[in-house]
Amino acid sequence: MVRIMIRVMAFLLAALLVGGLGVAPAAYAEPDPTNDVRDPKYNEDEYLAFYTPPEPLPPGVPGDLIRTEPSRLVLEPSGQLGAIVATGTRIMYRSIDARGKPMAVTGTYFEPDNDWPGQGPRPLIVYGPGTQGQGDQCAPSRQFNQGIHFSPYLDIAFNYEELFVATMVARGFAIVMTDYQGLGTPGLHTYVNRVAQGNAMIDAGRAAMRLPDTSLDPQGPVAFWGYSQGGGAAASAAELAPSYAPDLHVVGTYAGAPPADLKELFPYADGSALVGVVGYALNSVMTSYPEFADVIRSKMTPRGLDMLNKVQDQCIAETLAKFTFRHLQPYFNVDIQATVEEEPFKSLFDVQKLGRFRPSAPSLILSNRFDSLVPWTAANQLGRDWCAQGADVQFWTNEQPPFLNKAAVNHALPMLVDGERAMQWIADRFNGLPTTPNCGEF
């Protein structure tokens, strides 16, 4: 069943990533009826009660649970094709945003039906999802209830993270997946914000350990896992955990295709199927650092401002369909490549750079040398920076040759091709096997 599901989800993921090839982008200036934030689809009554945090937040510390409820886990909306072999619990927990303020974050805990066959207590994987979008309807904890989300006209989301979650729980790993800041909960999702998503990952692990009636040992082993946006979140969690969460017993981190230096993304995203993620990133910067919002907006053309307004309520499939293969420059009234090296852009992006802090646990970084969206060079530099600080790092280069580069195929496929390698590496960390670092060789 798991193998069949993986094949189905792989097909859906491929369709998602290249689907823009046959979609005519909408004219940028036309009204977009799917982007009205007042539309009920963004605030379905069934979700409002859970996803609206109490105001003010109850007293507590990072990782404290605010509320929980059972969560339906299905592969598609009807549930007739089966379900993930685990018991789901939707969680809301305390964390800290990029400005040091308390925030409420939601996520899902998966208690496996199967026993853990390895050594020691059942391990916990803290899972950072890849790019889902910026609308609340894209939150993974909502998607696991639906399998496939759809609302007219192009608001569609395939829960591609299911392929790994289903396999992991079948192998006995417990999982907690965060929604990150503002994805599902009020406020805009702070896409690829280093501190906010790193803290959200770490505190999801703490929250899972504090859930009652699970098979987890509160002092048991934890690993961080993620690819693409999730790879950056996992890498951030690995860096922040030694000082932010010394209470967690972190044994390893898998960071696949981490966007380690956001400034390098611009020429890669330009003209690609996923150029719209630049809109996510700029919206995130203005949400996290509102004092710079006017400056950023002043650099945008009317077309660029329209793009920012639209993508904030979209999931990745809709963003792909409406903005695929667009060039970035028409969205800006300045030279975009020069501007990212000027203030305040330079400092705003530099503060998101990974590699300044040393992880205390072993790390596996994976990147495709020909990744057309998230550059190999930045991921490689992250590994070098960690090695220079004495970290235990294994860097793996995927040599999948270039193929339909602007369709981001070389970014998506390594997630699937090297997924088994990453899962085995994580299992080895939980089983206490020796690591095989290759610092100085990559």
Image (cartoon, helix red, strand yellow):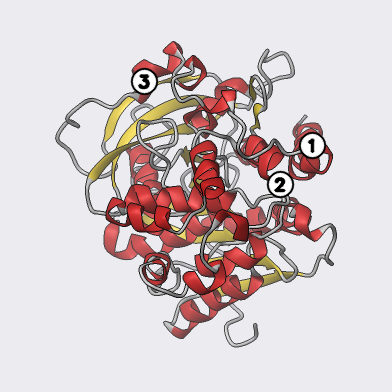
Q: Report which quarter residue 406 is drawn in.
A: bottom right
Front residue (pair 36, 416)? 36
Q: Residue at x 48, y 56 (%)?
A: 234
Q: Residue furthest bottom?
A: 440
Q: Earlier in the sequence, mark 2 or mark 3?
A: 3
Q: Earlier in the sequence, mark 1 or mark 3?
A: 1
Badge 2 is on which residue? 324
User: Which one is closest to the eye, mark 2 or mark 3?
Assistant: 2
User: Which one is closest to the eye, mark 1 or mark 3?
Assistant: 1
The local secondary structure at tag 1 comes to loop
Whether residue 261 is visible here, answered yes or no, is: no
Do the residues bearing badges 2 and 1 touch, measured as CB atoms within 8 Å?
yes
Which amino acid does the dot numbered 2 rest on? Answer: Thr
Which amino acid does the dot numbered 3 rest on? Answer: Phe
Which amino acid does the dot numbered 1 rest on? Answer: Val
Q: Which mark is residue 50?
A: 3
Badge 1 is on which residue? 23
The quadrant of the picture occupied by the C terminus is bottom right
